[in-house]
Amino acid sequence: MEEKNKRLDELDQFWDIGELLPRRQSGSRTPPQPHSTETVELVLEPISTAPDNTNHRLTLPHNERQRTDSIPLVQHTVAEEPRRQAEPIDTYCPDNPLLRQVRIYRWPSSYQYYARFVEDARRYLHVEAPPCPRVPFFSYVPQYTQLTEDRLAWYLYWRSQVRAGTYPDCDYTYLLLYLYEIINLGREIDPSDGLAAICALWLGYRGRYPRLDRFLGEWICDYCLVHHLPAPKNLPAEALDVLVSCSPLKEFWLSQAPGENEAYANALLRFSSNYDYHGSKFAAGENLPLYDEHIPAALAYTVAATADSRGSLLSGANLQDSRLSRDAFGGALCAHENKYRIEVDYCSFTRSHELRFLVTDIIKYSENKIRAHLGIKSRLGLYALPNEIRGIIDRYFAQHLPASRAMTPKRRAEAAEEKRYAALYEPLSADFSPAHAAEIEQTSWQTTQKLVEAFEDTEVPAPTPPPPVPAPAPVPPDQTEPPLAARLCTLKLDGVVRALLAEDTPGARAAATACGLMLDAAVDRINTEAQDSFGDILFEEESPGHFILIEDYREELADL
C-alpha cells in the first residue's frame, strides 16, 4: 500500500512545473533587465542653401566625403488614434455636370513617419545644381535622406531640366521622388503648376516607363479633387484614354461645360457602348477617316439635339446615383498633413444599361448611313432605336454627308472606268430592230451591185439577198420565270425568310429544321435563288449564326 501511494505521489509531482524549474540560489539575484539597444542617429551634413525662396545654384562642399546610403534613424511618434471627425474639412460642388458633391476628410490617425521628407522637400524646392554625371539610384520608397551627395546633385540638376521641358534619361526612382515632392508640398506650390508638372512628367517618360500609367490615373484625379481643379486639358487622345481607363472615377474626366457635346460623345463612345466601329471590316483603309469623322460627330449632334427641357441624352437615360469613397494618393509616400479621405457623390453613366443600349444603336445606325453612302449593301441590326433619334441622325447625315462626298476617290475612278468601257459596246441607235437590220443589209447589197457594174464590162448577175430575219415570237405568259417570292414558297423556304425578316434567329432555325436543313444551308439556297433572279444575295451573315437582310432588296420579298 505504501508503494502504491509513493507511486501516485511521483505521478502528481511529474506535472508540477515548479519542480522542473531550476532552484533559486540563496542571496540577492539581479532580476532580468529588459533588452536594450543603443540608438544611433546618423547626421547628414545639409547642402548649403540660401534662406530666401529665390532660385539658387547648388554649392557642393570641397571635401569628397560621401553621405551614407542608408536611411537614418528618425524619431517616429504615432499619436493615439482619435475618433474620426464627423464633419469634413472641405465640401464643394465641382463644375462638372456628373459630380454632385466632393467632401474631403482629414486622415483619421496622426503619424510623423514622413515629417522629415516634407522638411527636405521645402528646403530643396528652389535649389538647382550645375550639370553633372548621371548617378544610378534605386529605392522602393525614395526619400531625400537616401541620397548621397552625388545623387542629390544629379537629382537637382535633372529636376531643373524637367522643369525646363527636357526629359533626360534617368532611373525610375528619381521620377517617384519628384512626384512625392509635388504631392507633399501641398499648396506651397501653386496647385495648377503642380498638376501641370505631374502631367508633363508623365507624358515625357510614359514611353520609357509604362508603369506610370498604372497609378497616375488615380493620383491626378486625387490631386485635382483635393485642390478644386478640373481635369487637365489638351492631353493626347491616347493618353487620355489610358488615364480614364485607370481612374476609378471616370465621370471626373467630363469636366467640360454642358454645351461642349464632343466631350460627352467621346466618353460615351469609349465607356457606354457595346459596339466598337473600329472592329468593322468596312472601317478600314480609305474608309476609316470617314468613320472617325462622322460617327463621333453624329453622336455629339444627337446629344445636342436632345438637350431640351427633358435634359440631355446623358441625364435623361435613368443614370444611377453613386458614391465613391477612397484614400487619396494610395501607394504614394504621403505625410499626414497631405493625407485625406475623399468622398464623391456622382451620377454614373457607365452603369446605365438603358444608356448603353441606346448609344450602341446610335453608333450602329450611323454606320449604316455611312455604308449606304459607300454603296455597301449589308446593314447592322439594331436593338430598339426610337424613331425620334433616327430622325436626328438622318438630319445630320443629310447636312454633313451629301452623296457627292459619299463615294471615295477609288470608287469614283472605278465607276468612270466602268462607264467608259460600257460606252464602247453601246448600240448606235436605241431603236434597233431585226427589220431595221434587214433594211441596212439590203441597202448594202444595192451599193455593192452599183460598184460592180461601174468597174466591170461584163454584166454580173446581182447576188441574191438573204431572206429577211423573222422577228422573235413573244414568249407566252405562262412560260415566264416565276417571281422570287413564288419560288421560295415552292421550295418551302418562305418560313425561313419571314423569320429572318423579323430578326428572329431561333424561329428561322426552327423553320429550316422543318425543311430538313441547317440554317446556314437554308440561307445558302435562298441566296442562290436570289442570284439566279437578279444577280445578288439577299441575306448576309453579320455574326456567326445571325443573318440580316440587305435592305436594298426588301421590295423583292414584298409578296411574302
Image (tube, rainbow, N blue to C red):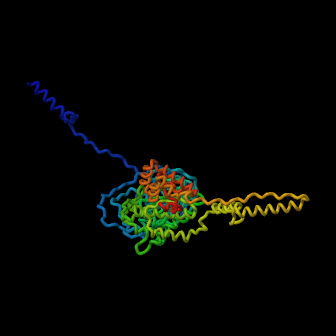
Q: Position of residue 477 (x, y in %)?
A: 56, 60
Total labels: the figure holds: 0
Task: Classify the position of the N terminus by image quarter.
Answer: top left
Q: Position of residue 487 (x, y in %)?
A: 51, 55
Residue drawn 85% across and 63% down? 450
Residue 120 in view (yes/no): no
Which one is in front, 372 or 121?
372
Tell me: 270 left or right of 20: right
Which one is in front, 70 or 500?
500
Image height of 357 relative to 544, above or below: below
Residue drawn 49% across and 49% down? 521
Extreme-right residue of the structure? 457
In which quadrant of the rendered view does residue 166 lie? bottom right
Q: Position of residue 40 (x, y in %)?
A: 40, 49
In which quadrant of the rendered view does residue 457 lie? bottom right
Q: Position of residue 116 (x, y in %)?
A: 42, 57
Residue 369 in view (yes/no): yes
Which one is in front, 265 or 558?
558
Tell me: 425 left or right of 288: right
In which quadrant of the rendered view does residue 110 lie? bottom left
Which one is in front, 339 or 548?
548
Extreme-left residue of the structure? 1
Image height of 140 relative to 393, above or below: above
